[in-house]
């Protein structure tokens, strides 16, 4: 988990909106089965894109303000930010290739 940043409502602005790097945030909860399915892909992406992409995890049970702010109604939801703006999102447990494709698009923007 060394390449992952813990994102909270309190540090969201500094860690995400003011980040020099594009950001991928995994919104999850302990009780969420599909969240556990997508977690290995998120961990791999954090390692593969280290230095190019900040990857964070936000527990929606402990940090509901951010989930509400971005209209998240289902988890897992992956939010992709660049230059402080929400650029894309992925809802549900999806294959790693789909996440990779979205990250590549984000980095190319």
Image: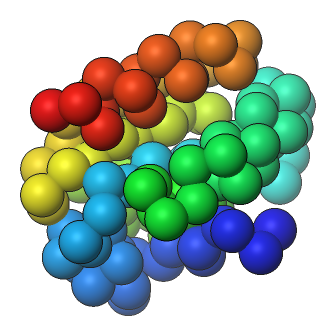
48 with respect to 32 (left or right): left
Q: Residue at x 48, y 77 (%)?
A: 8
Provide residue 31's location: percent of width, then percent of height: 85, 46
Work out whether residue 20 or residue 4 is closer to the camera in this orientation and state it.
20
Where 25 sits versus 19, above or below?
Answer: above
Instruction: Please tell me which residue is depicted at 69% across the width and 20% down the height of the picture.
Output: 96
Q: How many marks?
A: 0
* Quarter of the image where one finds residue 42: top right
**Residue 2, placed above or below residue 100:** below
Q: Would you place residue 5 above or below residue 50 in this image? A: below
Left or right of residue 9, residue 78 in this image: right
- Find residue 106 and report its image quarter: top left
Q: Where's the C terminus, which quadrant?
A: top left
Q: Nearer the viewer, residue 20 or 92?
A: 20
Residue at figure coordinates x 83%, y 54% from the top left: 30
Residue 29 visible, this angle: no
**Residue 15: x and y, percent?**
36, 78
- Tell me the quadrant of the picture where the N terminus can be found: bottom right
Indicate the position of residue 73 as horizontal and vertical percent values: 44, 31
Tell me if residue 85 can be seen.
yes
Between residue 97 and residue 72, name the one nearer to us. Answer: 97
**Would you say 21 lies left or right of 92 here?**
left
Query: How far across and down, in percent of the image, does residue 53 sit?
Result: 44, 55
Q: Residue at x 49, y 37 (%)?
A: 78
């Amino acid at each position: 988990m060394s390449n992952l940043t813990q994102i909270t409502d309190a540090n969201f602005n500094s860690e995400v909106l003011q980040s020099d790097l594009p950001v991928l945030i995994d919104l999850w909860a302990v009780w969420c089965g599909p969240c556990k399915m997508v977690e290995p892909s998120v961990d791999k992406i954090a390692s593969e894109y280290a230095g190019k992409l900040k990857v964070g995890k936000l527990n929606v049970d402990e940090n509901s303000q951010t989930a509400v702010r971005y209209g998240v109604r289902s988890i897992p939801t992956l939010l992709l930010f660049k230059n402080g703006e929400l650029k894309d999102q992925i809802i549900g447990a999806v294959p790693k290739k789909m996440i990779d494709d979205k990250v590549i698009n984000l980095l190319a923007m």
